[in-house]
Amino acid sequence: MTEAEMLRSRAKFRGVYAIPVTAFHEDGSIDFKGVSKCVEYCIATGSHGIVMPVNASEFFTLSDSERLAVIKAGLDANAGALPLVAGISGVSVQHAIELSLAAQDAGANALMALPPISRNVSPFVMEEYYRGIGEAVELPVFIQNHDPPAGQKVPLDVMVRLLNEVNTISYVKEETMPPGQAITAEFDAAGVALEGVMGGMGGRYLLDEYARGACGTMPGCHVPDVHAALWGALERGDEAESIRIYNKMAPMLLFENAFGAAVYKNVLHRRGVIASPHMRGPARRHMDSRDSDELDRLLAEVSEFFTWKG
């Protein structure tokens, strides 16, 4: 067994943990039927887990009651089929604990939080925030380590103390640059207290992350069948197929980096999963007709891996 395989073997949560979008009607209200269909789509296309609502779900455009309603809709649609990680990032420790307890009571399998989302905070406040969440709940907690502006980087020494001193804090979602080096540093510093690291950033760096022991990836849910095909090839040890699939995906991954959830929603609309690609501000990004044509071309490049029949 290689070192990377040994690191992965510690993880309870493993594989492609897809992030459903928050579907909206054209008037901006939540389309709960669309939310449920996104979860069903993730299950049907080979995802290994669900994560919601987080950045790719436009969580920062939702009220607290809407966030909890989305979590409950996801849990109902999932019906225990896959592990569901609830996004509970808050503006303060009190806010995050309230969301965490509600998600735990609703039946989530794990929780994930960015550092306080209202402003940049000191390492002391960041540690107090995560410690408060971890001590208030019984579920495993993911620290979401994310470069600005969508998050804040958690200092390694803070992360290691939390992993070693708070039993529930046991996973990291790594989204700082360069992610591969960060993953190696976290495993080296935290030892067995770190049960697993999942990559983010749409899966753009998964080949390197996997080689360093990452237990999974958390991409948007627009092409989960393609991500599942890549993960399957990695798990089989089929290097040639892994590289072939990744090379097919890479242009799509670069394109979605420019438009974020706008790409996720436009693809889901094209694939018959959601009725509208509408986004709320301030998340909304405009794709013009040339972008739309390019998206069609990129989808055609990866269509051989599609398993969703609609």
Image (spheres, rainbow, N blue to C red):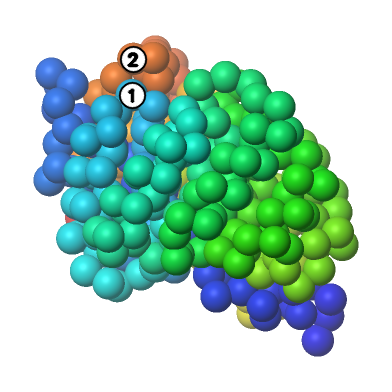
Mark 1 touching mark 2, by CB under 8 A? yes
Left-right relation of 250 to 282: right
Look at 87% across and 62% down and name the residue there: 188
* Gap in angstroms between the C-alphas marked 1 and 2: 7 Å
In terms of depth relative to the viewer, which is nearer, 249 or 59?
A: 59
Left-right relation of 67 to 177: left
Residue 53, relative to residue 261: is it above or below? below
Judged from the image, the secondary structure of the residue bearing numbered disc 1 is helix
Q: Position of residue 271 (x, y in %)?
A: 27, 45
Left-right relation of 88 to 207: left
The furthest residue to the bottom: 1
Residue wearing tag 1:
61
First in sequence: mark 1 vs mark 2: 1
Q: Position of residue 77 (x, y in %)?
A: 19, 60
Left-right relation of 27 to 124: left
Is disc 2 surrounded by few (<14), some (14 to 19) or many (20+) residues within 10 Å? few
Picture quarter containing residue 296?
top left
State whether residue 271 appears in this view.
yes
Picture quarter containing residue 241?
bottom right
Residue wearing tag 2:
281
Look at 18% across and 21% down and name the residue there: 28
Mark 2: amino acid: Gly
Mark 1: amino acid: Thr
Residue 70, relative to residue 138: is it above or below? above
State whether residue 309 appears in this view.
no
Q: Name the disc covering residue 202, or none.
A: none
